[in-house]
Image (cartoon, rainbow, N blue to C red):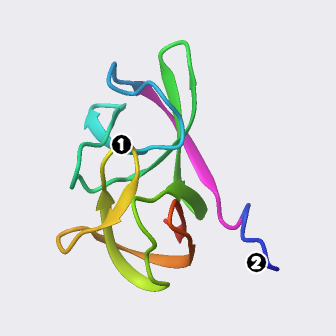
Amino acid sequence: MNVNFNGYGENVATFIADSSLTETGVPVKVSADGTVAKCAKNDVFCGVCTGLRAGYATVQLSGYAKMKAGAKIAVGYKKLAAGENGAVAEYASGREYLVLDSTATSVGVIL
């Protein structure tokens, strides 16, 4: 792809990391006051974990984000939720996001 969307409208907040959150790059959900957890399959996500340190997680809540995908997702507005193994997948009851680019293993969305 000849264009790059990195940095577009990125906003990141710091949360307490639930014990289920052990890796970055995965979709997360708010699990308690000020706390995020790794999403289970079909969970609607609020953002993507961009960093973990000392029990805290940084979470990108808006802007362009590149995430793992379980399969190629067509571009345009699509309903997405957490898939398996920290990936993102189409899901009829998911939240609508703008998909800008996709491969068989990754998807770029505007959160």
In this picture, residue 109 sits left or right of residue 6: left
Q: Give whichever of 64, 12 is nearer the camera.
A: 64
In this picture, residue 84 sits left or right of residue 106: left
Looking at the image, the residue that sits furthest to the top is: 54
The label number, if any, that marks residue 1 in the structure image:
2
Compared to residue 55, the image places residue 24 above or below, namely below
* Position of residue 16 measured from the top left corner of the image (x, y, whole percent): 42, 24
* Position of residue 93 measured from the top left corner of the image (x, y, whole percent): 17, 70
Answer with the quarter of the image where residue 3 lies.
bottom right
Compared to residue 72, the image places residue 36 above or below, namely above
- Which residue type carries mark 1? Asn
Element type at mark 1: loop
Query: In terms of sequence position, does the residue under pointer 2 or pointer 1 come before the other?
Result: 2
Residue at image point 27% right, 56% down: 44
- Which residue type carries mark 2? Met
Answer with the quarter of the image where residue 63 lies.
bottom right
Compared to residue 75, the image places residue 4 above or below, namely above
The label number, if any, that marks residue 29 in the structure image:
none
